[in-house]
Image (cartoon, rainbow, N blue to C red):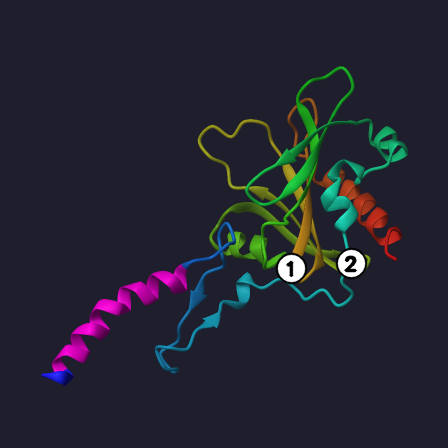
């Protein structure tokens, strides 16, 4: 009878253990895969969901605390935009920028402070088919990627984003559009490069 009660207790506790294992603070952790050549308790991360490592991490505390300081006044003038308001979303914090005398957002800088896996978060989304356009690259030695979201039935304005990894646990992204709604991948990359330059200049 003792062995039978132990087996019943194990069956009851198993769902609770699985539920605890699935709990995560990230908005959407990357999927994991298992292989038949390894025991069922061993998992291996899909290489397609891993971003390149950041070999020289940067601190961005000042910018995550004040995301609208990401672009200087001179840089805003250079790109023809002005800061509008702070943005707080499911991935982190950021700042929106608009065109003078034009209400809609022209671009936004977002720091993924609520994501613990850094740029690999975007790679995991890409592995799930979230992006139509996907172009990995690097900027001044830091892993980066340009991307556009997969079009829904009602796509709205055409946006392009560019993300740069600051550390293995932190990245920022820039999204850009213009007044006609045409994708601005080159503008997003230029804006992201300007933000990265400001972060690098702020290192103590």
**Callout 1: few (<14), some (14-19), or many (20+) C-alpha neighbours within 10 Å?**
some
Q: Is residue 126 left or right of residue 65?
A: left
| 99 up-or-down from 63: above or below | above
Residue 32 location (% of width, % of height)? 45, 66
Residue 76 location (% of width, % of height)? 84, 31
Q: Is residue 151 left or right of residue 2?
A: right
Q: Is residue 101 left or right of residue 2?
A: right
| The stretch drawn in magenta includes residue 19 | yes
Depth check: give the residue in front, 64 or 101.
64
Could you tell me how many numbered marks the image carries? 2
Which corner quadrant holds the N terminus? bottom left
- Magenta segment's dominant SS is helix
Depth check: give the residue in front, 152 or 95.
95
**Callout 2: few (<14), some (14-19), or many (20+) C-alpha neighbours within 10 Å?**
many
Residue of label 2: 58
| Image point (64%, 49%), residue name | 113
Depth check: give the residue in front, 192 or 85.
85
| Image point (75%, 40%), residue name | 66
Q: Residue furthest left?
A: 1
| Residue 34: quadrant of the picture | bottom left
Q: Circle 2 sits in a helix, a strand or a loop, which is it?
A: loop
Q: Which residues are magenta?
A: 4-22
| 147 up-or-down from 41: above or below | above
Q: Is residue 35 left or right of residue 93?
A: left
Residue of label 1: 169
């Amino acid at each position: 009878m003792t062995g039978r009660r132990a087996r019943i207790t194990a069956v009851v506790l198993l769902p609770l253990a699985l539920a605890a294992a699935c709990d995560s603070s990230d908005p959407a952790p990357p999927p994991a895969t298992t292989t038949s050549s390894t025991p069922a308790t061993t998992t291996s991360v899909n290489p397609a969901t891993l971003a390149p490592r950041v070999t020289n991490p940067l601190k961005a505390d000042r910018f995550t605390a004040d995301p609208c300081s990401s672009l200087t006044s001179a840089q805003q003038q250079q790109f023809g935009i002005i800061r509008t308001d702070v943005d707080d979303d499911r991935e982190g914090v950021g700042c929106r920028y608009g065109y003078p005398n034009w209400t809609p957002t022209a671009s936004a800088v977002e720091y993924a402070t609520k994501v613990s896996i850094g740029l690999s978060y975007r790679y995991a989304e890409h592995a799930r088919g979230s992006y139509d356009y996907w172009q990995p690259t690097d900027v001044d030695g830091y892993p980066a990627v340009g991307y556009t979201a997969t079009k829904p039935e009602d796509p709205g304005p055409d946006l392009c984003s560019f993300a740069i990894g600051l550390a293995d646990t932190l990245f920022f992204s820039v999204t850009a559009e213009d007044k006609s709604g045409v994708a601005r991948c080159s503008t997003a990359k230029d804006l992201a490069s300007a933000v990265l330059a400001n972060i690098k200049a702020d290192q103590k």
